[in-house]
Image (cartoon, grey):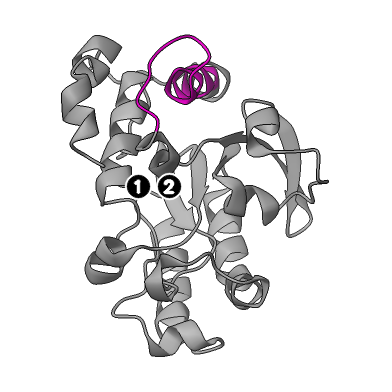
Amino acid sequence: MKRDCLEIVREKCENCHACALGATRNNIVFSDGNPSTAKIVLIGEAPGETEDMTGTPFVGRAGKLLSDFLAEAGISREEDVYIINTVKCRPPENRVPTDAEKASCRKFLEAQIDIINPRAIVLCGATALKSFIELDKKQTISKVRGQWMTVTVDGKDYRAMTIFHPSYLLRNHSMEDGSPRRLMQEDLRNIKNEVLSDVNHDSIDISADNIFANSSEQLSLV
């Protein structure tokens, strides 16, 4: 049922030219994940070049790093998370989408959330956060990340948490206590414990040491 409803939304999205991004895209980047089993909606900023070519969100270097962090926390990208962006088309030169572009795409974003009806929403990065929460000048993503909050979508309240965008982590390699990568680990484990405590994936057995020990390999990603 969810898949059928989402397919209707996808078809409308594919025919959308409400903003200028529709004229420059190769593909819409609609979603990734299993809508039938996903308990979390993760919202990123916008598609990049690789996503625009493949039609799938978070498949470049930052996406690979996100997948690693999810797996280390015991969260299945394939089963637990439904991944979308604030806009469905790539902004030229990977710039941040404008408020007008996000507004044009909002109906698709809200429809996806309505259909999935997640236990929680994860806002990945500052652009996703600012799409739901108005921040003052003293508030930065470093100060609000990791905190549970409430966001309202189409009149319904959802639990939500902000995490660092993985592209930021590509530039920050330290795994010391208090580092962005260590905080990312802590936030995702919190989400796992709070949202997916009744969900087990025996196939996920990835340790932080295996993913992050080779610092030279992580440096080569930049």
Decide if residue 192 is on the left or right side of residue 28. Answer: right
Q: Secondary structure at mark 2?
A: strand
- Front residue of 185/105: it is 185
Identify whether 166 is placed above or below 133.
above
Residue at 39%, 44% (x, y): give it. Answer: 167
| Quarter of the image where the C terminus is located | top left
Part of the protein shown in magenta: 172-190
Q: Which x, y percent locates residue 157?
A: 75, 44
Q: Is residue 121 magenta?
A: no
Reading the image, the residue beneath label 2 is 82
Reading the image, the residue beneath label 1 is 34
Q: Is residue 186 magenta?
A: yes
State which tag comes first along the sequence, 1 or 2.
Answer: 1
Q: Tag 2: Cα neighbours inside 10 Å, few (<14), some, or many (≥20)? A: many
Which dot marks residue 217?
none
Residue at 70%, 38% (x, y): give it. Answer: 140
Identify whether 49 is placed above or below 129.
below
